Image (cartoon, coloured by chain):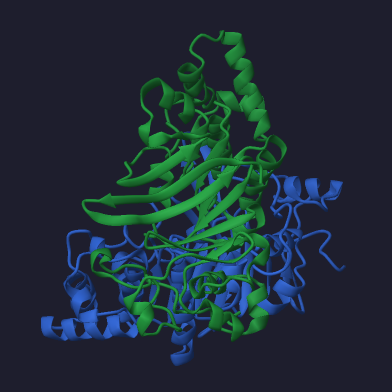
């Protein structure tokens, strides 16, 4: 049994009389201790997928499908049942660490709250545990951080505090949604290296969400590429990076930043613009931007077909 | 070199007495593309704002087309300022949500070309949109109808209208998906090459800057640590901090190296008033006593290549790269 099992999930909204579809049928299983990299552009539905899993979507979201965590159905579960799981066993961190912290509470109080709420700890126990959690995420001067307010910390320190908070409940799964996109490359490298040490120390499943393949490449064992609310390719990371089969995945590989090699006259990019939830498609959603699109691609939607080395949704996958 | 367009001489800026930029000097030649890299808090955006006089310099001179901007006021300053334009990181925040794209583009024309005819302005707006690869029909749209990349191109189109000789781009693509960053960077490269418009590209990502810019300035805590020709990077960088910036960039190439990126690089900060010595010494794996005591000055290490490091000679001999 997979740790997290998302099946045929669909999410849409009715906004100003228009149907806005953010997830258009996604099935994704994450195993215990597995690290999955989820890659796609803004609006591809990658965040919505997990907000839905945690019951964090706005009230007007219309959902279909199933999300099971350790076999328990989360869709339609009440807040009490969800609260036993989210924030403890299943936890999520976001791109902007400043808006995820309460500005007028000291770091120590915010970490302590998690422990007194979820664990029923006393205040002194909570303080000791909060200090240990900060030490664990390798933040400098943890004692001092407990007494500080969020605005007194740097972006990297704030993200470490949020990771510490996410780890307090001893989770078996961490969803990290663009955890380093708001940070400098140097701090990003530290946070990614920290995830690596974390996984070496304990069996923690991580879903690392990013628009940049290179960010997930080092950590992920499997990479899932989303486009317009659907999975277009899923494969072991090494295979997908070396031999992408979907033309979109191939373009994403080409767009990853390069530091070595000769200077480029022009940088590679995916032409056109990413589709939105209001757009509807007859054929393949990527066809308008695809360098390999044929008439069939505009008429018939390719289904996600699973083969020996992963799954791809394309009528004309590369190397076929 | 085509002659100097902008010369920054010993620029210093302070906020509430705390130094943010100290003794920063560099030049941008006519039509040149220069990159400015560093972490948050390095003073990159302050430098950009000082160049367009959005913040005041405490010391130093900004010579633009032979005129010191610090001494220049009123009409003369406005005339020079139109040739010196800036775009910012967040393309949505730089456009007014209640204005159509056409209205947003009309503003600079009303300011800089107050006596032009309606037909002339319409033609200029259409031309500007086409120049940045957008259709003329974009003029009727609102920012919320645009993608991030389209918004950033509108911001560029607006900055182009006064015919700038230097466009300052402060993190122009870091809010955009990697998949479309290339579109915007290539557009800037085209404008730079075809129209000889000089660029100052500010970014925390050295990998991006290296392709577009001929020279790269590395800034840390308000000080220039290295100025290097891009073709010498990544291997020919002489400052340990530049190497740390290079190593930190996540790339697919680095996977084959199988190493963790350098972790010495992160965590800028500290009280600028208390420090002596090299600003990188606290984090530098090669620092020794003199690095903590005396600040290294920029010295020339090659053609167009300067570095401020006491140990650059021994470190490059020892194969730092």
| Residue at the image position 44 percent from the left and 90 percent from the top | A202
B121 left or right of A89? right
Q: Which of A111 and A284 is in front in this view?
A: A111
Q: For the view shown, which residue lies furthest in the left direction?
A: A123
Q: Which of A73 and A211 is in front in this view?
A: A211
Percent across and percent down for residue A308 are 77, 79
A23 left or right of A238? left
> Which chain is green in the rendering?
B
A181 left or right of A248? left
A123 left or right of B147? left
Quarter occupied by residue A218: bottom right
Q: For the view shown, which residue lies furthest in the bottom direction?
A: A201
| Residue at the image position 58 percent from the left and 77 percent from the top | A220
- Picture quarter with the N terminus of chain A: bottom right
Number of on-image labels: 0
Percent across and percent down for residue A263 are 71, 60
Percent across and percent down for residue B278 are 38, 72
- Picture quarter with the C terminus of chain A: bottom right
Quarter occupied by residue A156: bottom left
Does residue A283 show up? Answer: no
Q: Is residue A117 above or below residue B41?
A: below
Q: Nearer the viewer, residue A21 or B157?
A: B157
Percent across and percent down for residue B81 are 46, 30
> Which chain is blue in the rendering?
A
């Amino acid at each position: 049994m997979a740790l997290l099992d998302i099946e045929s999930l669909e999410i849409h909204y009715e906004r100003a009389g228009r149907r806005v579809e953010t997830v258009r049928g996604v099935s994704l299983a994450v195993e215990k201790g597995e690290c999955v990299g989820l890659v796609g552009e803004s609006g591809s539905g990658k965040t919505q997928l997990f907000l839905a899993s945690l019951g964090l979507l706005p009230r007007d979201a219309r959902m279909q499908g199933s999300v099971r965590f350790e076999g328990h159905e989360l869709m339609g579960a009440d807040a009490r049942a969800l609260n036993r799981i989210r924030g403890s066993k299943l936890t999520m961190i976001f791109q902007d660490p400043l808006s995820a912290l309460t500005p007028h509470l000291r770091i120590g109080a915010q970490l302590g709250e998690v422990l007194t709420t979820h664990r029923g700890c006393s205040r002194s126990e909570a303080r000791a545990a909060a200090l240990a959690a900060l030490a664990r995420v390798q933040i400098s001067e943890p004692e001092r951080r407990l007494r500080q307010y969020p605005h007194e910390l740097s972006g990297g320190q704030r993200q470490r505090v949020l990771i510490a908070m996410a780890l307090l409940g001893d989770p078996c799964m961490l969803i990290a949604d663009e955890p380093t996109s708001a940070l400098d490359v140097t701090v990003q490298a530290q946070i990614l290296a920290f995830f690596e040490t974390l996984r070496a120390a304990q069996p923690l499943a991580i879903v690392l969400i990013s628009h940049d393949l290179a960010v997930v490449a080092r950590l992920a064992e499997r990479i899932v590429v989303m486009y317009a609310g659907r999975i277009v390719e899923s494969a072991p990371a090494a295979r997908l990076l070396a031999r992408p089969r979907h033309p979109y995945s191939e373009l994403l590989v080409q767009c990853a930043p390069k530091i070595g090699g000769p200077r480029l006259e022009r940088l590679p990019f995916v032409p056109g613009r990413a589709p939105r939830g209001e757009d509807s498609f007859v054929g393949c959603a990527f066809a308008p931007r695809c360098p390999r699109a044929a008439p069939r691609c505009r008429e018939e939607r390719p289904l996600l077909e699973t083969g020996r080395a992963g799954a791809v949704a394309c009528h004309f996958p590369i190397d076929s | 070199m085509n002659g100097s367009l902008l010369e920054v001489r010993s620029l210093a800026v302070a906020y509430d007495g705390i130094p943010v930029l100290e003794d920063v000097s560099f030049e941008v030649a006519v039509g040149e593309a220069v990159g400015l890299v560093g972490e948050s808090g390095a003073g990159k955006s302050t430098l950009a704002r000082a160049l367009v006089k959005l913040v005041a310099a405490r010391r130093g001179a900004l010579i633009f087309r032979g005129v010191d901007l610090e001494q220049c006021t009123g009409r003369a300053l406005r005339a020079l300022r139109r040739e010196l334009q800036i775009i910012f990181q967040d393309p949505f925040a730089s456009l007014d949500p209640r204005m159509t794209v056409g209205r947003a583009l009309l503003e600079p024309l009303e300011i800089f070309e107050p006596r032009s005819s309606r037909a002339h302005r319409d033609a200029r707006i259409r031309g500007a949109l086409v120049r940045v690869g957008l259709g003329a029909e974009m003029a009727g749209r609102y920012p919320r109808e645009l993608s991030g990349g389209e918004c950033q191109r509108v911001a560029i189109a607006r900055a182009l209208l006064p015919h700038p000789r230097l466009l300052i781009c402060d993190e122009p693509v870091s809010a955009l998906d990697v998949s479309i960053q290339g579109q915007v960077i290539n557009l800037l490269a085209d404008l730079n090459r075809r129209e000889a418009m000089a660029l100052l590209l500010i970014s925390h990502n050295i990998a991006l800057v290296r392709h577009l810019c001929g020279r790269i300035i590395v800034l840390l805590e308000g000080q220039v640590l290295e100025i290097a020709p891009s073709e010498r990077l990544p291997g020919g960088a002489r400052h340990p901090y530049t190497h740390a910036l290079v190593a930190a960039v996540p790339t697919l190439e680095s996977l084959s190296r199988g190493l963790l990126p350098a972790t010495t690089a992160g965590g800028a900060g500290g009280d600028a008033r208390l420090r002596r010595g090299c600003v990188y010494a606290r984090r530098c794996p090669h620092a020794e006593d003199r690095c903590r005591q005396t600040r290294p000055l920029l010295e020339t290490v090659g053609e167009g290549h300067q570095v401020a490091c006491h140990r650059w000679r021994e470190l490059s001999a020892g194969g730092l790269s």
